[in-house]
Structure formats: structure tokens, C-alpha cells
Image (cartoon, grey):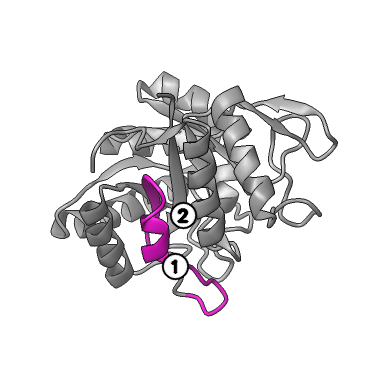
């Protein structure tokens, strides 16, 4: 049976306007990208998600970001490579300590928000992320065909390509910026159909109607999107109907 990983950004709902249901999402995903206390999250939230993930067989990944809590890590921050290195190492170490205390461990690193998008093309920052991941012994999850994929390969660490079922794509394979129409998808049936197409055919329909090839090992559904639980449930059901198994790409937690 063909298989795909299903991941979600969790542990972020400390802000009043960031509403997520971590418990419900953990029952549906196979991997959880856990906020490390910079853009969101705190030790109590991290510990709770780690314990619940371990109990459900969900793999935990570090989800570090720019140190930009006020902007939820979604604003571009011009951080020097040396400072970014230090910020990311601190965040990964923070999660590692919390996860260990909860009886688990982070199995990969997936940057969040603006940093994730920057290292699609910024080779210098991508090298920083790859260096931090390599130092922690973690694979990196990110956009296929990106600078971070190349940096991960050069650093000798595994790269896990992912695709987004609830985000709009441009014809060049990049994501539609959140400031533009069509960036975030809310139609549950459409999102579920996109997940099946990505898992089975390795393609997605871009905003202009063109077909974009996206070979991915993991699919992401954002945990803070309104209706995220319904989307994730519909994705699981659609994948099952298509004969696609959902399981962690990076093994047991």
C-alpha cells in the first residue's frame, strides 16, 4: 500500500488569536511540528504535546523560527547568520530537553513561517538551518527543489520533501504569500482532493490553473487554520479511500 506522512504545526495556541486543537489534530496526523518557544509555545504546552504524541505514536519534530513572538514568526526579520544560528540552536535544545523529560525526542527539524519561506531561495540562511540540524543529528523537512534541500544534502543529512494541502501554489512551485488572495484554502473537499492528488500523482493545481509537480514524502495541514480538524479528518478519510496509508516518514517516536 502506498504511504504518505501527514504533519501539522502544533503547540502554537498560546496567543489569543491563534486557536488550535492540538489533541484533536494529534489523533489525525502522523508527525507534529512543535513550536519551540520563539514564535509560539511554552514549556507546559511543549511537554503536553510531547506526552500526547508519544501515547498516540505521533513523531515529534522541532519547529523553530525567527525570534519574533509578536509577529508569530511570519514576518521577515533580517537576522545575521551568526545570530540566527544561536537562536535556532537554543530553540532546538529547549525542545530536546522538554521532550526528553516527557519520555520522547525530536526526530526532525522543520523551520516555521517566514524563515521556512526564506530558505527556499536564501542559500546562506539555508546553510545555517542545515548546520543546526546536523549538529542536533536531525533530518530537515522543507520545500522540494529549494536551497534548504541542497544545503541539507551538502551537510550530509536527510531531507524530507513536503507539500501543503491547505496552501495555494504559484506556477513555479512556490507558495502564494499569505498577503495575497488564494494563499490559504478553506474548502474541506478541495483540500482533501488536493491531498490525494499530491500523494498519488505528485502534483497540485496552481492558482493559474497550471499543474505543478511536487514530489513529497509528507503533507502538511496547518493546525491554526480555521476548520483545521475537519480538514485533517477529511484528508485522512480521502487518503484511506484512495488506498494511501498515513504513517510517519521518519519512524516511530
Tag 2 secondary structure = strand
- Image height check: is 103 above or below 5? below
Q: Which residue lies most toward the front here?
A: 241
Q: Who's the residue at 73% across and 49% down the image? A: 177
Q: Quadrant of residue 226?
A: bottom right
- The mark found on residue 187 in the picture is none
- Disc 1 crowd, CA 10 A, few/some/many (<14, 14-19, 20+): some
Q: Which residue is mark 1?
A: 21
Left or right, 166 with reference to 84: right
Please tell me which of labels 2 and 1 falls first in the chain.
Answer: 2
Q: Foreground residue, 234 or 75? A: 234
**Residue 97's image quarter?**
bottom left
The residue at which mark 2 appears reads as 9
Residue 45 in picture, x, y percent from top left: 32, 69
The answer to if 28 sits in the magenta stretch is: yes
Quadrant of the rendering where the C terminus is positioned: top left
Asked if 137 appears above or below 186 in the picture, the reply is above
Q: Position of residue 86 (x, y in %)?
A: 38, 50
| Residue 16 vertical placement versus 210 (above, below) | below
- Pick the residue in front: 245 or 125: 245
Going 14% across and 59% down the picture, which residue do you hit? 101
Pair 2/1: label in front = 1
Q: Which residues are magenta?
A: 15-37
Foreground: 65 or 62? 62
Amino acid at each position: 500500500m502506498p504511504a504518505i506522512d501527514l504533519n501539522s504545526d502544533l503547540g502554537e495556541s498560546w496567543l489569543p488569536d491563534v486557536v488550535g486543537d492540538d489533541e484533536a489534530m494529534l489523533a489525525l496526523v502522523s508527525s507534529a511540528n512543535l513550536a519551540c518557544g520563539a514564535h509560539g509555545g511554552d514549556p507546559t504546552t511543549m511537554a503536553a504535546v510531547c506526552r500526547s504524541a508519544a501515547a498516540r505514536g505521533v513523531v515529534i519534530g522541532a519547529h523553530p523560527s525567527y525570534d519574533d513572538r509578536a509577529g508569530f514568526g511570519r514576518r521577515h526579520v533580517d537576522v545575521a547568520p551568526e545570530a540566527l544560528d544561536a537562536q535556532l540552536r537554543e530553540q532546538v535544545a529547549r525542545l530536546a530537553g522538554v521532550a526528553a523529560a516527557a519520555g520522547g525526542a525530536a526526530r526532525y527539524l522543520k523551520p516555521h513561517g517566514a524563515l521556512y519561506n526564506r530558505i527556499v531561495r536564501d542559500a546562506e540562511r539555508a546553510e545555517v538551518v542545515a548546520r543546526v540540524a546536523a549538529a542536533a543529528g536531525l533530518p530537515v523537512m522543507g520545500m522540494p527543489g529549494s536551497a534548504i534541500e541542497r544545503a541539507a544534502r551538502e551537510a550530509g543529512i536527510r531531507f524530507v520533501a513536503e507539500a501543503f494541502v491547505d496552501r495555494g501554489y504559484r506556477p513555479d512551485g512556490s507558495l502564494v504569500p499569505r498577503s495575497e488572495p488564494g494563499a490559504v484554502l478553506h474548502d474541506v473537499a478541495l483540500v482533501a482532493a488536493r491531498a490525494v492528488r499530491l500523494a498519488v500523482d505528485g502534483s497540485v493545481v496552481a492558482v493559474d490553473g497550471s499543474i505543478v509537480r511536487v514530489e513529497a514524502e509528507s503533507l502538511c495541514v496547518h493546525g491554526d487554520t480555521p476548520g483545521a480538524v475537519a480538514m485533517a479528518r477529511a484528508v485522512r478519510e480521502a487518503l484511506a479511500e484512495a488506498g494511501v496509508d498515513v504513517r510517519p516518514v521518519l519512524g516511530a517516536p
